[in-house]
Image (spheres, rainbow, N blue to C red):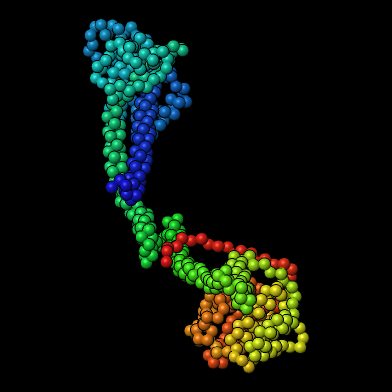
Amino acid sequence: MFRSLRTKLVLSHLLVIVVGMTLSGVLLLTFAERYLLDATAESLMTQAYVVARALVPGAVPAASAANVSQATNAMQQATNLYVQQSTVHKSQSPERATAMQKSNLAHLSDVSVRLSSDLPTRIRVLDERGLVLVDSQNGTDEGLNRAMEPGVAVALTGEQTTCTHDGVMHVAVPLFHEDRVAGVVCVSQPLHDTLAVLDGLRWLLLLSTAVGVLAAGLVGLVLARAMSNPLRELATAAAHLARGEFDWSLHIRSRDEIGQLGDSFRRMGAQLQRTLDDLAQQNERLCELEDLKTRFVSDVSHELRTPLTSIKGMVETLRAGAVDDVQVRDRFLGTIEAETDRLAALVNDLLVLSRADSHVLELRLDAVDITALVRESVERLAPQATSKGVRVEVVASAGPAVARVDPYRIQQVLVNLLDNAIKYSPAGGVVTVSVAPSPDGGLCVAVRDEGPGIPPEDQPHVFERFYRAGGSRKGRGAGLGLSIAQALVEAHGGHISLESVVGKGTTVSFVAPSTASSGRCTLSNRPLTVTPWSRC
């Protein structure tokens, strides 16, 4: 139970309230007790002044006349107090009577004192020896020496004093005559009324504390629930997130820090969901790349195995004795040379693709006349077109078509496209190369043949490496020409596309940007995001 935040909040609120009310109650009782005792002491002191002025006119109390007058006026206004004295005959023992007659205040021995108010106050008048001359409590102490009482002993030295003993407050005021202590007025009053008031205050404070704690507990419970419920809902949402469940709703509507925390938690959940979706997509792409890599290695192995097997067979044949036959030897050496050239071209193509994939393909950009570059590429492949019986036509405007490109790489693209077009065109067919401005401001170069075309199901894959379309195109080349062309065009910031109709021919076109930075350009590596992925 004590692990609950709600319980801790309630207990902490109650503890603070109990401590606060206890301290305030103790301080209040202390101040009230001090106030009541001071008020009682002041009242008794005032009564002592009144009695002193009434009974001993010639004597002066310890306080100044102004203070005595002020105290007397205050008492008269508050209680209409006055002192009645009368002469009565008191029956006393001979010893007490003799001792009293020897006092300087012997005339008070036959005086009776009574206050107008029915106050439980006891008044005693003592001479300079501490002998009691007047006692308002039926003369109990008259004739007795009380000089050893603590308050009387101090007053006889000339200082007024206040003390409390056995629930009774005593005030002793010295009387001076000719700068000497002539006597003492001692006024006493029980404190049971004051103590009763203090006890009542204690019970009231105890009751108010209990009620306050109960009310505070209820309010604290409500507040703690209002504070802990959002936190509990956040904990539940965190548990859902830990289990990979994102279809939960967080109902926190407060505007305080907890509400801000709930908003941050909702945003975190949404971001986490998007991140997981991105990771899933990246995982799928990585699986596809893994499949492509596996297929790529298999295709490269196959492409390398065929010429190597052919070369090895011919070498073994020559070593077995065919080298003595000049015609066979020359034919075999020509075939070995052709296969070696094929291997060199394949390795060079793979190197170009590898650099393009690594974004480190080096380009030397310069202002180049694309039309002149097209005509040069056509002239380069003219023997191949003539042997095949294919005519190549160039369609371009009369003026130069200038673009900032790497002439060697763009010519490599043109040679690949023209080679494919001548290779798949029938005898007597026409290959058309056109150069024209593109809508986006670049230059569009299109190579069109009159070959058998590419089936629609194969067209989305023609730019994949080692992919060979079906039909009459199957089995010709390594399947890297269009892949290299695409890599080189995209390295320039352009794009390449293919359109084909079965039986009518194929058109491959690419757009070269008309503006680019001149000089030597090396493509910088794009940032990579490394994410974990499962095996496909």
Quarter in which the C terminus is drawn: bottom left
Residue 279 x, y percent position in the rendering? 46, 65
Which residue: 36% across, 33% down? Answer: 30
In depth, the one of 516 and 119 nearer the eye is: 516
306 sits left or right of 263 in the view: right
Q: Position of residue 45 (x, y in %)?
A: 38, 25
Judge by depth and name the residue closer to the eye, 325 or 452: 325
Image quarter for residue 206?
Answer: top left
Whether residue 513 is visible here, answered yes or no, is: no
Judge whether residue 471 can be spotted in this image: yes
Depth check: 316 or 388 in front? 316
| Figure check: 384 above or below 163 | below
Total numbered circles: 0
Horizontal arrangement in the rendering, residue 130 relative to residue 285 (left or right): left
Tell me the quarter of the picture where residue 165 sits: top left
Q: Describe residue 357's horizontal placement relative to residue 156 as left or right.
A: right
Residue at point 56% right, 76% down? 478
Q: Relative to 362, is 368 above or below?
A: below
Q: Residue at x 35, y 32 (%)?
A: 33
For image coordinates 35% across by 17% down, the residue present is 151
Q: Residue furthest right?
A: 399
Residue 309 lies, with reference to residue 226, above or below; the image says: below
- The picture places residue 66, in percent across and down from the top left corner, at 47, 26
Q: Position of residue 102 (x, y in %)?
A: 33, 6
Could you say which quadrant of the image residue 120 lies in? top left
